[in-house]
Amino acid sequence: MTTKVNLADAFSSFTDHWSPKVAGNINNMQVKLAKFEGKFDWHHHDQEDELFLVVSGTMRMGLRTGDIDVEAGEFIIVPHGTEHRPEALTDDCHVLLLEPNTTLNTGNVKTDKTVEVLDRL
């Protein structure tokens, strides 16, 4: 089935932070939407690369080699095995993620922000 997703409508349909929602599937990948607020936890993914596309607001990708600020309309790809910590620099930063459907949001660690089963929009 072919569907269209309006990002503004999709982001307005939820309020929780650091809890990705599945907006679509493409092959073995998922398009996820998440709202960021404050700092996330340091983690890495052994097998999965991740793409973070900032839709609104500004995020900082904390990396052990140095932080990278990502503005609305920009994206960053974090290769697997790279320790990272996303952080919202603005209130309610909206981010689209593209990653394999096996990706756990907290990677190699389990915290209070771990979401094992994702809601679908």
Image: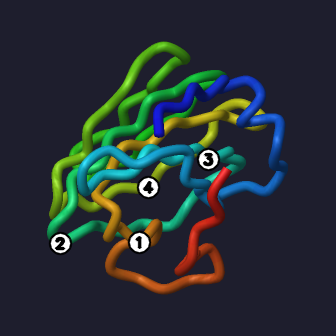
- Residue type highlighted by circle 1: Leu
Q: Which residue is drawn at the image coordinates 65% and 64% (left, top)?
A: 119
Residue depth check, mark 3 versus mark 2: number of the one nearer the observer = 3
Q: Of tags 3 and 4, which is closer to the observer?
A: 3
The residue that mark 3 highlights is 34
Reading the image, the residue beneath label 2 is: 46
Marks 1/2: CA distance? Answer: 11 Å
Mark 1 — residue?
A: 104
Describe the element under mark 2 as helix, strand or loop.
Answer: loop
Disc 2 and disc 4: Cα gap in Å?
Answer: 15 Å
Give the mark nearest the N terminus, 1 or 3: 3
Looking at the rendered structure, the secondary structure element under dot 3 is strand
Q: Looking at numbered disc 3 in the image, what kind of residue is underneath it?
A: Ala
Q: Do residues under tags 3 and 4 come within 8 Å of each other at their CB atoms?
A: no
Which comes before the other along the chain, label 3 or label 4?
3
Label 1 and label 4: CA atoms lie apart by: 14 Å
* Badge 1 or badge 4: first in the primary sequence: 4
The crowd level at tag 4 (other Cα within 10 Å; few <14, some 14-19, many 20+) is some
Neighbour tally class for label 2: few under 14, some 14-19, many 20 plus, Cα within 10 Å:
some
Between 31 and 81, the one lying in front of the other is 31
Amino acid type for the residue under numbered disc 4:
Arg
